[in-house]
Amino acid sequence: MGFELSHFADIAKMSRAAWQRGMESPFQGEADVVAKTRGPPSTRASLRRDLLGLGLAEGSTVLVHSSLSALGYVVGGAETVVLALEDALGESGTLMMPAYSLSAPDPENWRHPPVPESWWETIRGEWPPFDRYLSPALRLGAIAETFRHQRGTGRSENPSNSFCARGPDARTILDNHALDDSLGESSPLGKLYAHGGSVLLLGVDHSSNSSLHLAEYRAQWPGKRWGRPLKARMVRGESVVEVLLRDLELNSDDFSRLGEDFEKETGSVRTGLVGTGVGRLMDQHALVDFAVPWIEKHRIPA
């Protein structure tokens, strides 16, 4: 039994009543985007034109980090953005997005927000196992989460730093994602590098640019160290298994500055409007090769 027009009328009345009581409307976020959008709304066709104008090539393999709200009002929202990306890449292109999840929770280190110490063991013991079909992506936005649900999209099997991909090269990129060094050489990031892929930032800056973590694995600096092993559970076939994860202590605090220097010093980032947001398209090879010596130069002990 589907929605009828009366249901939408009821929702509108509830929203209006909430606003009159000084509460935030459930549609307030969308209303804010409408108010901030200058010019016509973006569509699947207009976004495709923007992406091709930016330099996204048919048949290429690209890793996308995104913010839907930064693109202005998009007719159809996140679904439209995914379809426009796939239209631009064509059937011979491969689309890739992060799908990080919290399947190895360590509440002792949680700060945003912290939880009571009396909860720690319950959280560790009761957190659901990682299931690549079920576990949600963590704080990556509506576009990445919508893409994760699309028919034909695959997901790598890593309880903390999985990626999703769809297209001819998806399996090559996603298969055999190591449990350790999860953003290193044998990760989808390392395979994208070997494949000669690209990175596209849609409405976000380099602080969200996960390929810079691959540079962290390759770089050497005085404060580089490995985190303590973490236990995680994950679904394999019909069973749940316990695995041990060990990874580099990653730090993205300087990624914005690193990315700005990369743009200024190389001039190799193509920028342009996608919707009403800024798109940044770059070769992942060039990005990582620049970032390794940059990290080694700038990450010095305080």
Image: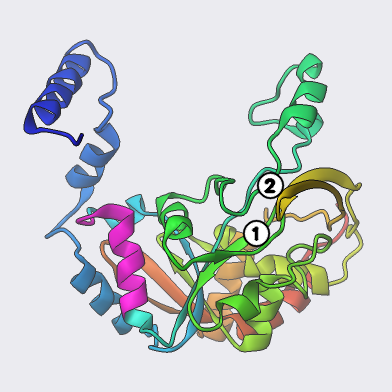
Relative vertical location of residue 200 with respect to residue 91 in this rendering, above or below: above
Residue 272 visible within the image: no
Residue that mark 1 sits on: 162
Few, some or many residues within 10 Å of mark 2 (<14, 14–19, 20+): many
Q: Quadrant of the N terminus?
A: top left
* Quadrant assignment, res 54: bottom left
Residue 60 visible within the image: yes
**Region of the chain picked out in magenta, as a range:** 74-87
Main SS class of the magenta portion in the image: helix
**Image side of residue 137 versus residue 159, left or right:** left
Few, some or many residues within 10 Å of mark 1 (<14, 14–19, 20+): many
Q: Position of residue 127 (x, y in %)?
A: 71, 33
Q: Position of residue 153 (x, y in %)?
A: 49, 66
Q: Is residue 225 magenta?
A: no
Tally of numbered tags: 2
Q: Which label belongs to residue 130?
A: 2
**Image side of residue 197 versus residue 175, left or right:** left
Q: Position of residue 124 (x, y in %)?
A: 79, 30
